[in-house]
Amino acid sequence: MSVSKWSLDFRANKEISIAPVWVSFPGLPIPFFGRQVLHKLTSVLGRLLKIDAATGDLRRPSVARVLVEMDVTQTPVSRIWIGEEEYGFWQKVEYENWPEFCSFCERFGHEEQQCFKKHPTLKPTKISQPQQTLSRPTWVRRQGDAVRDIRKSGMEGGDGGAEAGI
């Protein structure tokens, strides 16, 4: 379940396909680690939610990590062009734990290939096991220290002695 801003196309039986995803930019030059630059870079992907503490403090200059709110129905881009038309470079983009989203039933947790609604044959079936009949409690007759089952001994009729259930 998620909470989001109301929209005209809201349907209660459909999950929104927006999810937070950690995005890494390996090898990003240090001048691009500023909040405004990262905000501009991530605007291509979605809405910037958070900058990783190590990225903000420049403790790990080998990679910049940000949390981005993304539409997971869109194909994730593998690289972004940074610069102008003639001068610039391609920046690699990596995603951590891309959420599984089924575009058929519009639910998180599985992809369309594993959807039980689209492919009912994938749904596991219960294997019915023969029911075991429960036997009724057995009454036993005590004689001294020995306890025996009266059904096995054929003395079910009772001969005036005390009976107790175990």
Image (tube, helix red, strand yellow):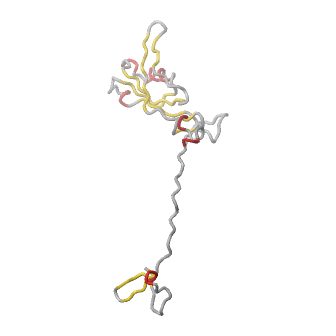
- Position of residue 121 relative to residue 64, above or below, is below
Single out the residue that lies furthest toward the left: 59
Q: Quadrant of residue 51?
A: top left
Residue at 43 percent across and 15 percent down: it is: 90
Give how far across and how far down residue 67 sits, in percent.
45, 31
Question: Which is nearer the eye, 122 or 34?
Answer: 122
Which image quarter holds the C terminus? bottom left
Single out the residue that lies furthest toward the bottom: 160
- Position of residue 67 relative to residue 36, above or below, is below
Q: Is residue 55 left or right of residue 131?
A: left
Single out the residue that lies furthest toward the top: 86
Give how far across and how far down residue 109 sits, in percent.
51, 39
Residue at 66 percent across and 34 percent down: it is: 9
The number of callouts visible is 0
Question: Which is nearer the eye, 3 or 148?
Answer: 148
Give how far across and how far down residue 4 sits, in percent.
58, 37
Question: Which is nearer the eye, 55 or 103?
Answer: 103
Give how far across and how far down residue 107 sits, in percent.
56, 38
Q: Is residue 93 left or right of residue 6?
A: left
Q: Quadrant of residue 14?
A: top right
Which image quarter holds the N terminus? top right
- Position of residue 58 relative to residue 127, above or below, is above
- Position of residue 110 relative to residue 57, above or below, is below
